[in-house]
Amino acid sequence: MSNRAELMDRARQSIVDADEMKAMSVIDEARAAGFDLVELLRLGFGKGNTQIGDAFEQGILSLPELLYSSEVMKSVTERVMDSIEGTIEKKGRILLATVEGDAHDIGKNIVASTLRANGFEVIDLGREVPASEIIRKAEEYQVDIIGTSALLTTTLPEQRKLEQLLRELGLREKYITMVGGAPCTIRWTRRIGADSYSEDAIDAVRQANLLMEKKNQNKGSR
Ligand code: B12
């Protein structure tokens, strides 16, 4: 019989080791032992996800290692979310995309997995997505939040384009906007009029929680 703390640690380690087989067997064991899979995702696998992001930033982890680990985190999140589909109430619906002209999606994928692991429904449009397409999909899925990632100084203006387009279409008040990516700053966020900026995936979850709370309070007071 597995003990909870030991399973959590094996979950964390499976992401660090990018070991998909080990990760899947941890999920099976946790399910058989009746553990909460969302908690396992958040406090076990999620911890590994944060650890690999930090290690890459500190130059301890190589790029291929980061990629392998984030792919395992993606599979694990999908497996857990599929198995609990419909049993938990989602905190909000978030659309994520890397902006047009930008092929960098490792960070966005980590943000997507971390948000999913923390109870958000994520619609991930992938990379190199034009602002008009982002808005079309936001309307189609009636999302609460639109999050964009930009890793190049040359593609950063696409985040401003999205804000402008939303305003032109009279949709700016309908959506909460979050921005991220290495060249993005708080100053840039204020300058373009986005609602929130996060330096990493954990802060993205914190911000998304706060923004949804605020949205729900406003709804309640109307
Ligand atoms: C991997 C990589 C690539 C890969 C991308 C693979 C992929 N599938 O993503 C490849 C090889 C394709 C690539 C190509 C290019 N790259 Co590149 N690339 C990188 C590299 C090494 C790592 C980026 C990364 O994944 N970081 C790790 C993740 C975890 O961090 P992150 O993306 O910042 O995400 C975190 C936060 O920013 C935040 N976040 C991210 N997105 C979002 C979104 C939201 C909504 C929120 C809230 C938060 C958030 O949370 C994330 C998790 O903590 C960086 C250098 C570096 N060391 O950072 C260069 C870098 C970004 N690339 C660079 C360049 C120049 C290019 C190319 C133009 C090179 C070329 N001449 O062809 C091309 C451009 C291709 C294109 N059209 O986009 C430059 C950019 C310089 C600049 N200031 O513009 C960098 C900085 C390298 C350098 N020092 O010169 N690249």
Image: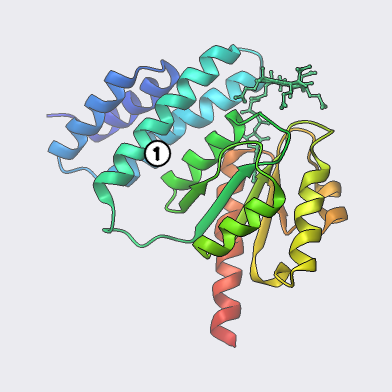
Asked if residue 85 is positioned above or below residue 180 in the image, the reply reads below
Q: Position of residue 14 (x, y in %)?
A: 36, 21
Q: Position of residue 66 (x, y in %)?
A: 54, 19
Q: Nearer the viewer, residue 125 or 3?
A: 125
Please tell me how many numbered marks the rendered image carries: 1
Instruction: Give amino acid for label 1.
Output: Leu
Q: Nearer the viewer, residue 53 or 153?
A: 153
Task: Tell me the SS state at disc 1.
Answer: helix
Mark 1 — residue? Answer: 43
Question: Badge 1 local density, few (<14 within 10 Å), some, or many (20+)?
Answer: some
Q: In which quadrant of the rendered view does residue 138 lie?
A: bottom right
> Does any atom of ligand 1 lie closer than 8 Å to the CB of label 1?
no
- What's the residue at 55%, 44% (across, down)? 125
Left or right: residue 186 versus residue 23 is right
Q: Position of residue 60 (x, y in %)?
A: 60, 12
Left or right: residue 54 versus residue 132 is left
- What's the residue at 48%, 50% (across, down)? 122
* Color encoding of the figure: rainbow
Quarter of the image where ligand 1 sits? top right
Q: Position of residue 105 (x, y in %)?
A: 60, 31
Q: Nearer the viewer, residue 139 or 193?
A: 139
Asked if residue 222 is positioned above or below residue 58 in the image, the reply reads below
What is the residue that sits farthest to the bottom in this orientation?
Answer: 222
Q: In which quadrant of the rendered view does residue 47 lie?
A: top left
- What's the residue at 61%, 19% (across, down)? 56
Q: Is residue 28 visible?
A: yes
In the rendered image, the quadrant that contains the C terminus is bottom right
In the rendered image, the quadrant that contains the N terminus is top left
- What's the residue at 57%, 42% (across, down)? 202
